[in-house]
Amino acid sequence: SIDVCFSPELLHLYNLKGKAVVAVDILRATSTMVTAFAHGAADIIPVMELNECQAYASQGCLTAAEREGIKAEGFDFGNSPFSYMETDITGRTIAITTTNGTRAIRMSEEAAEIVIGAFLNLDAVAKHLTELQLDVIIVCAGWKGMFNLEDTLFAGALTEQLLDLAQFSSANDATLAALHLYKKANSDVLSFLNDSSHVQRMKRLGIQKDIEFCLQHNVYDVLPVWKKDRLVDLKKE
Ligand code: MLT
């Protein structure tokens, strides 16, 4: 089955044991992680708190931190996918904390598998899930506990693919809502998202190019999954 959890704050209502979670924060945390792996990162350590993230610098990690859409002071990177194209990160470990995305990942640790999903690696995620044959819960990062549109659209896109692959069913309203919304938005996701809160926030911050970048489908054949205490790219294992 496929289910959608619209916010990490609702995770207590779900039983993750034995299931596959797809953690999603399209703008921008999971899109950025996928991009970092595609540009050579060895592994990524998502953490919830700024000081926790900062502490990884003394272990030779690169550090990345975002709050309110802005790079936090004292870290190597913020949360733009482009930062991992401008610097050589080959073989490096990146510790990262973001407002919502890293919370969605760390709050899903009970799951049998956590996969990092983005439009950028949609096909790789869908294919992996069909091979895993576990029930799927798509965990949207949302914004500070609230629903958001971009993560829901991704949930709809992934649901559409999984239903096409036949062995999945989606007999619940959250999944159906995501699917219907995606079908409506599909022909022009960028315009559909124009009035959404984080798109508006990012535009105010002048980071419009990140939005367009993160909405592209299947740019990278990358499959970040949670292994013990960090994310690794299964495609490189
Ligand atoms: C988050 O985790 O809330 C984000 O990815 C925010 C952002 O950097 O755009």
Image (cartoon, grey):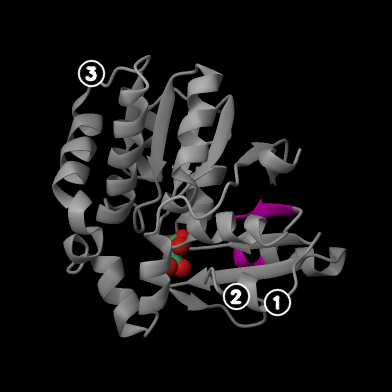
Q: Which residue is at a point 65% across and 78% down the rendered structure image?
A: 86
Q: Which residue carries the number 1 mark?
A: 87
Q: Which residue carries the number 2 mark?
A: 83
Number of marks present in the image shown: 3
Measured Cα–Cα span from mark 1 to mark 2? 7 Å
Q: Which of the 4 quarters of the picture holds residue 144?
A: bottom left
Q: Which residue is at a point 58% across and 35% down the rendered structure image?
A: 109
Measured Cα–Cα span from mark 1 to mark 3? 45 Å
Residue 162 placement (x, y as % from top left): 36, 27
In front of the other: 38 or 171:
38
Q: Amino acid at mark 3?
A: Ala
Q: Amino acid at mark 1?
A: Thr
Residue 112 placement (x, y as % from top left): 58, 24
**Crowd tier of the residue under label 2, counting other residues whose Cα lies within 10 Å: few below 14, some 14–19, many 20 or above:** some
Residue 158 placement (x, y as % from top left): 36, 37
Q: Magenta part of the protein: which range?
A: 43-51
Q: Is residue 115 above or below residue 72?
A: above
Please give left or right for residue 181 compared with residue 89 in the image: left
Q: Which residue carries the number 3 mark?
A: 171
Would residue 17 be visible to someone looking at this image?
Answer: no
Mark 1: secondary structure = loop
Q: Is residue 184 above or below residue 125?
A: below
